[in-house]
Image (cartoon, rainbow, N blue to C red):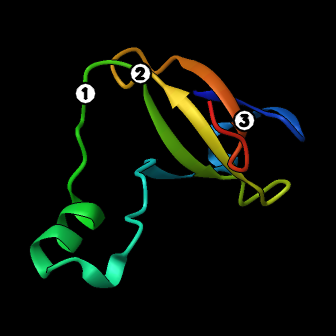
Amino acid sequence: MLLIDCPHCGPRSEHEFIGMGEAAERPAEPAALDDEAWGGYLYHRRNPDAPVLEHWWHVHGCRSWLQVQRDPHTQAIVACQPCQERP
């Protein structure tokens, strides 16, 4: 079981969260993108074998959005912070 250290609620089971995948920088002008570029933003992720920054929603807790830095190879949580802050 994965424990996520919510900055508001403390350590909680991963079952209280919904993982929303890798955090991607939103394009500055989404309307200016063609379909291929917009599809790339929505669906293509790097999938590295190194720690990645992800968005997680604490749906069964404080309901806040978190940025979780997680190593997908070892499942280790490196850092966790509210989405308003940048690492």
Q: Residue furthest bottom?
A: 31
Above/below status of 80 relative to 58:
above
How far apart are labels 1 and 3 at the CA level? 21 Å
Identify the image quadrant of the N terminus. Answer: top right
Residue 80 in percent (x, y) is at: 68, 30
Label annotation for residue 51: 2
The residue tagged 1 is: 48
Label annotation for residue 87: none
Q: Is residue 76 left or right of residue 86?
A: left
Kind of residue at disc 1: Pro
**Residue at point 25% right, 47% down?**
45
Above/below status of 34 relative to 60:
below
Q: What secondary structure is found at the residue carrying circle 2?
A: loop
Above/below status of 39 relative to 50:
below
Residue 81 in percent (x, y) is at: 72, 35
Q: Is residue 35 left or right of residue 13?
A: left
How far apart are labels 2 and 3 at the CA level? 15 Å
**Earlier along the polypeptide chain: callout 2 or callout 3?**
2
Exactly how many numbered labels are in the figure?
Answer: 3
Label annotation for residue 81: 3
- Residues packed near mark 1 inside 10 Å, few (<14), some (14 to 19) or many (20 plus): few
- Residues packed near mark 2 inside 10 Å, few (<14), some (14 to 19) or many (20 plus): some
Q: What secondary structure is found at the residue carrying circle 3?
A: strand
Q: Is residue 72 left or right of residue 10?
A: left
Above/below status of 72 relative to 17:
above
Kind of residue at disc 2: Pro
**Residue at point 37% right, 25% down?**
72
